[in-house]
Image (cartoon, helix red, strand yellow):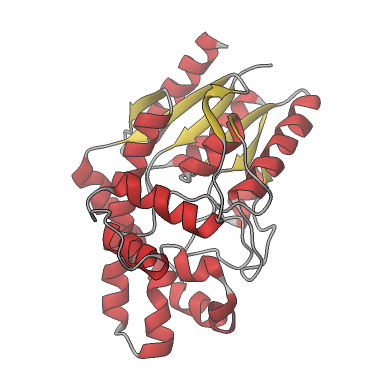
Amino acid sequence: MKPIIVIVGPTGVGKTKLSIELAKKLDAEIINGDSVAIYKRLNIGSAKPTKEEQQEAVHHLIDIKEPTEEYSVYDYQIDTRNKIEEITKKGKRVVIVGGTGLYIKAALYNYIFRKGTTYNTYDDLSNEELLEKIKEYDKDTAIHKNNRKRLIRALNKYENKEPITTNKDECLYPIKVVGLTSQREEIYGRINKRVDKMFREGLLEEIISLKDDYKSSRVLKSAIGYKEFYDYLYHDKPLEVVKEEIKLNSRHYAKRQYTFFNHQFNTAWYEVNFENFEETINKIYQDIKKEA
C-alpha cells in the first residue's frame, strides 16, 4: 500500500486546493478530516470545499449527518478506515485533509474507543471554559486553569463516565503528513480576512437558516464559526462582537493546531508561497514522488 497523504495546517492556508491538486496528480480520492464538514448545511462557517471544488476530485465524509445528529470520533474512526479500504481496493491512493487532529490520528493510529465515546481535544474551548465545564461535575476541582492537558483529560473522563484505552504510538498505515505553514502574522491576517469573506458570502443567512437546530445541536453550540452566534440569536449579542469572537477563536485554534500536529505527527512542514501556490504544490508533489 502506498502511503496515505495527510494534509494538515490551520484554516486559510490552502489545504483544500492542495488536496484537490494532489488527488488529480496521484489518482487519489479525498477523505475529509474536519469534524464540522461532516454536517450538512454547515457550509460557509465550516469552510468546507464548495460543490464546485468537490466535483474536481472524489470527496468522502462530507455532508453525511444533519446538525442535530450525533457523530463522534468513534464514528469517524470506523468510517475513515472503511473508506481507506474501499479506496485502496480500487487501486487509488488516499488523501486525508483537514484540521481536526484528533479525528485524523484516531483513524490512522491504534486508538481504541468504546461505542459512544466522544473523546475530544476541545480545541474550540479556552482553558477557562474547560475549567467551568469541569466545575459542573466537580465544583471543588483543584486543577489549575493553565494546565490544559489535565483539564482535557479530566473533562473527557467526566463526559465519557469511563476511561479510554489507547495505543497512540502504533500507526496502522504507511503515511506521509504534509503541513502547510506561514509566518504567524500572515496566518492571522488570512484568518481575519477569511472571516470577513464568510460574512460577505452569507454566513449570517446560513446561521439564521439553522436557528431552529441550535438548541438541540452539539456541533452548532461548540464549533468555531457557529457557537459564537448563540448569544446573537437568543440574547441580542451585537453582530460585530460575534465577528471579532470568531476571528479571535480561530486564531487561538490555529495556534493549538500547530502544537498538536508538531507533537502528534512526524509532520513535514512547507512554507506556503501565497503569491505562487503552484510552486508549493509542485514542491510537495515532487517530494511525494521521491518517497513513493
Q: Nearer the viewer, residue 269 or 68?
A: 68
In this rendering, the answer to whether 268 lies above or below 205 is above
Question: Residue at (49%, 42%) from the top-left corner?
Answer: 102
Choose top left, top right, bottom left or bottom right for residue 212: bottom right
Q: Position of residue 113 (x, y in %)?
A: 62, 42
Choose top left, top right, bottom left or bottom right for residue 226: bottom left
* Residue at the extreme left: 185
- In which quadrant of the rendered image does the N terminus lie? top right
Question: Residue at (39%, 34%) from the top-left corner?
Answer: 261
Q: Nearer the viewer, residue 96 or 265?
A: 265
Q: Is residue 276 visible?
A: no
Q: Nearer the viewer, residue 158 or 89?
A: 158
In this rendering, the answer to whether 198 lies above or below 160 is below
Question: Residue at (64%, 17%) from the top-left corner?
Answer: 2
Q: Is residue 166 visible?
A: yes
Q: Position of residue 151 (x, y in %)?
A: 34, 52
Choose top left, top right, bottom left or bottom right for residue 224: bottom left
In this rendering, the answer to whether 121 lies above or below 182 is below
Would residue 34 be found to the left or right of residue 138 on screen?
right
Q: Position of residue 211 (x, y in %)?
A: 53, 82
